[in-house]
Image (cartoon, rainbow, N blue to C red):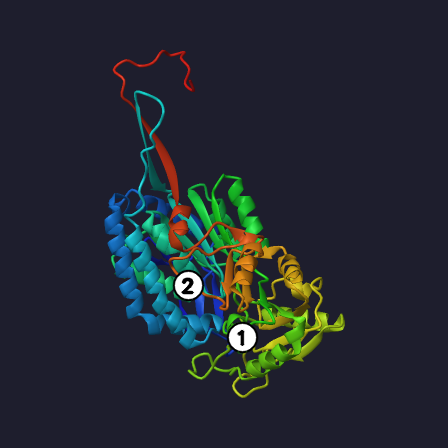
């Protein structure tokens, strides 16, 4: 097995407590690497390194120079795609071909934000007060704590690093203990690309030993988190104690609405892609499918037939289309939703069992699952399952579709399948979601903001919105008068 320490101040650093955690390969069910079990002492060392870096070469670097550095990071990513993809696949069970595509695309995020680094301009407001010149400037917060989940570690880390570094911040990363190796490796590669020591640090471990003390550290001035809404609430509450701003990308229970006038073949393909290509382990997965009554049976026939073709197996096999769930505990949790729903009268149309296919014997494989006869009040239709379990609900008309779609505490994504463009615009306006996909699903771009409504989060990642999440605005007033105003004058007059 490979053994990994923390990555602090440009060096591999052994954990202060001496402990390590096994990283389990979800395909084999066996340990394949170990990571350091972090403590508050490790967190403090990393934060202090990030704080020192703010006044070192990184802090003195121009925005243009930072942009050039980010471009080099993109090049380094492209030079290490195969290696990083294999690490991610072993860590979380995602299929290798998918990981290669994601990591290749991540180079564009570094390049986009590298190009944006010196394009964020202040303003000169035409203030109404004579004798004063006023201008604004945008400055980094300082040390950013970034906490990321196990389902897409590198993707969701780069979504934070690229804009945050472009803005001039430094980072302490806390990847999920289930999947830390790729993020550790990325940090070391960034140092090789020329990033000054201390700008990006990684401390691994669990929430109690690393996550909580990192968010609470007094020198951390901004927190970015991707994960579930329960953890997100705890992080927001902890950060609020020290008035730290947060960016939270949380869970989803995204509706995918199929109207009778839709191209049903395309809708079925988009639904399967939006749900099963990530094994359902994606926050924006279209886990609630709403189908208009008049085409329900026809659409279900196509959906089931297409889902049956999914190839489960070794994530490193190019023929594999779905990998395992992350752990046995998560497998049991996901299957528990299916058991409960069928006990309440729902129908398991497909799947709902552990896979017995050749090559799936040792991994945490759940057959792609479709549950019909679901009421929107059931837990399976309201809570984020984070597995390959799709619930299907009927609706009569546009108003009922909107009512069902919005009847959830989440608001991350929503899909609409229709050939009526007027309806497409109406639905896009009425759906309570941060991203609405029309005749498509699960599309992302480094240029377009991503985030949620309601319990799905605060703030946005990607696009110009993202870099502003990592900057604060300063207003500067220059007095031009030769004689100062009277000390007891009227400052607002």
Which mark, residue 484? none
- Circle 2 sits in a helix, a strand or a loop, which is it? helix
Q: How many marks?
A: 2
401 on left or right of 311: right
Crowd around label 2: few <14 · some 14–19 · many ≥20 (10 Å): some
Residue 25, above or below 197: below
Residue 399, above or below 267: above
Q: Nearer the viewer, residue 52 or 224?
A: 224
Q: Nearer the viewer, residue 88 or 47?
A: 88
Residue 5, above or below 362: above
Crowd around label 1: few <14 · some 14–19 · many ≥20 (10 Å): some
User: Which is closer to the viewer, label 2 or label 1?
Assistant: 1
The spot of residue 68 in percent (x, y) is 24, 55
- Circle 1 sits in a helix, a strand or a loop, which is it? loop
Q: Quadrant of the N terminus?
A: bottom left
Q: Nearer the viewer, residue 210 or 370?
A: 370
380 on left or right of 286: right
The spot of residue 97 in percent (x, y) is 41, 77
Q: Nearer the viewer, residue 380 or 414?
A: 414
Query: Which residue in the protein does label 1 denote?
Result: 263
Q: Is residue 325 in view from this perspective? A: no
Residue 192, above or below 89: above
Query: Which residue in the protein does label 2 denote?
Result: 155
The spot of residue 12 in percent (x, y) is 34, 59
Instruction: Pick whichever of labels 2 and 1 is earlier in the sequence.
Output: 2
Q: Is residue 260 in view from this perspective? A: yes
Q: Quadrant of the C terminus?
A: top left
Q: Tell me the distance, in whole angstroms, between the alpha carbons under discs 2 and 1.
A: 32 Å
**The quarter of the displayed image where residue 362 is located:** bottom right
Residue at image location 54% in from the left, 65% down from the top: 415
């Amino acid at each position: 097995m490979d053994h990994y320490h923390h990555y602090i101040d440009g060096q591999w650093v052994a954990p202060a407590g001496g402990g390590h955690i096994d990283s389990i390969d979800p395909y084999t069910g066996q340990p394949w690497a170990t990571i350091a079990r972090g403590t508050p002492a490790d967190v403090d060392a990393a934060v202090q390194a990030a704080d020192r870096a703010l006044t070192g070469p990184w802090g003195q670097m121009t925005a243009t120079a930072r942009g050039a550095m980010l471009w080099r990071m993109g090049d380094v990513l492209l030079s290490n795609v195969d290696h990083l993809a294999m690490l991610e696949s072993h860590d979380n069970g995602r299929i290798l071909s998918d990981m290669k595509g994601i990591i290749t695309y991540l180079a564009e995020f570094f390049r986009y934000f590298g190009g944006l680094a010196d394009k964020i301009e202040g303003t000169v407001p035409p203030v109404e007060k004579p004798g004063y010149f006023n201008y604004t400037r945008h400055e980094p917060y300082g040390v950013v704590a970034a906490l990321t989940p196990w389902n897409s570690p590198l993707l969701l880390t780069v979504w934070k690093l690229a804009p945050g570094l472009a803005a001039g911040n430094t980072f302490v990363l806390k990847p999920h203990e289930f999947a830390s190796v790729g993020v550790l490796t990325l940090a070391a590669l960034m140092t090789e690309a020329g990033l000054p020591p201390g700008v990006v640090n990684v401390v691994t471990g669990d929430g109690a030993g690393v996550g909580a003390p990192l968010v609470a550290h007094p020198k951390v001035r901004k927190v970015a988190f991707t994960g579930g809404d329960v953890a997100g609430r705890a992080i927001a509450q902890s950060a609020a104690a020290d008035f730290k701003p947060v960016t939270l990308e949380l869970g989803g229970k995204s509706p995918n609405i199929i109207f009778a006038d839709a191209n049903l073949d395309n809708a079925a393909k988009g639904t399967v892609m939006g749900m099963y290509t990530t094994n359902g382990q994606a926050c924006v997965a279209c886990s609630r499918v709403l189908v208009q009554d008049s085409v329900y049976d026809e659409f279900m026939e196509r959906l089931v037939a297409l889902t049956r073709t999914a190839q489960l197996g070794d994530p490193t096999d190019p023929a594999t289309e779905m990998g395992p769930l992350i752990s046995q505990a998560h497998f049991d949790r996901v299957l528990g939703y299916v058991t409960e729903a069928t006990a309440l009268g729902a129908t398991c149309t497909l799947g709902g069992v552990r896979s017995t296919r050749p090559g799936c014997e040792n991994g945490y494989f759940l057959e792609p699952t479709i549950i019909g006869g679901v009421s929107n009040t059931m837990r399976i239709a309201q809570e984020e399952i984070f597995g390959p379990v799709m619930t299907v609900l009927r609706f009569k008309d546009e108003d009922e579709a909107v009512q069902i779609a919005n009847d959830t505490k989440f608001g991350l994504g929503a899909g609409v399948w229709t050939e009526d463009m007027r309806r497409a615009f109406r639905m896009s306006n009425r759906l309570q979601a941060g991203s609405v996909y029309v005749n498509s699903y699960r599309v992302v771009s480094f240029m377009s903001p991503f985030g949620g409504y309601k319990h799905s989060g605060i703030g946005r990642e990607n696009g110009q919105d993202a870099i502003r999440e990592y900057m604060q605005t300063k207003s500067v007033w220059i007095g031009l008068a030769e004689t100062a105003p009277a000390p007891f004058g009227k400052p607002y007059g």
